[in-house]
Amino acid sequence: MNNFEIFGLEEKFAIDVDALTERYQSIQKNVHPDRFAHGSDQEKLLAAKKSTQVNDAYQTLKKPLKRAQYMLELRGVDMPSEQASFSDNAFLMRQMELREMLEEVKFADDIDAAVFEVSQVLETEFEQLYKEMQIALLENSDASNQSASEILRKLKFYQKLHLELDRLEDLLFDE
């Protein structure tokens, strides 16, 4: 049973996260190990396994990038490691530009404005790629799934860069 089936959801990227959460809570009430505290060892073990499976499925489906990766894995797409180099030279150049932009925040006269500017750039570019990935996942062909896989790698880069910006902001404003 795949993660979508656990929650009775159609296997698609666009899901109602509130409905997912409601189903998760309902299922967890029924399978939680505490309900089987007085059961046999086997019942306790099965309940613990089922509860873990439901929790793992929920954690995967509630986060869009994890959900996209899971969908691609279900479709048999080999996901390149995040350390594998990109064949997209334009994106490699963009990565370097974004890293330089992030580095320059430390030396800005107005750190607030610099952080805001970098954040806006990251969010805008992330949203554009996110929309492209949604379209590719919806198409669900070999070529579009491969494209979605590459876009997902790029989105993970933007996500990491945004976390680095958050850490930098904390560091700069704690001084």
Image: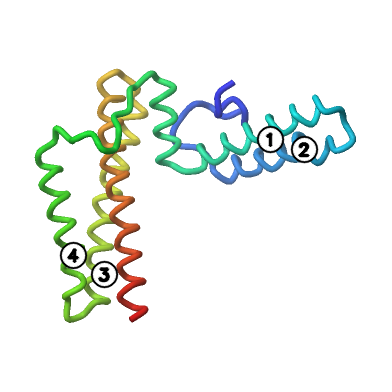
Q: Which residue is disc 1 drawn over? A: 51
Q: Secondary structure at mark 1?
A: helix
The amino acid at mark 3 is Val
Q: Secondary structure at mark 4?
A: helix
Label 1 crowd (10 A; few <14 / some 14-19 / many >=20): some
Q: Which comes before the other along the chain, label 3 or label 2?
A: 2
The amino acid at mark 2 is Pro
Is residue 119 toward the left or the right of residue 16 in the image? left
Q: Which residue is disc 3 drawn over? A: 115
Q: CA distance from mark 3 to mark 1?
A: 41 Å
Task: Please provide percent x and percent y for residue 113.
Answer: 23, 75
CB within 8 Å, label 3 to label 2: no
The amino acid at mark 4 is Glu
Is residue 51 toward the left or the right of residue 172 in the image? right
The amino acid at mark 1 is Ser
Placement of 63 over or under 9, stated as above or below: below
Q: Which residue is disc 4 drawn over? A: 103
CB within 8 Å, label 4 to label 3: no
For the point 26% across and 46% down, which residue is it? 128
Q: Secondary structure at mark 3?
A: helix
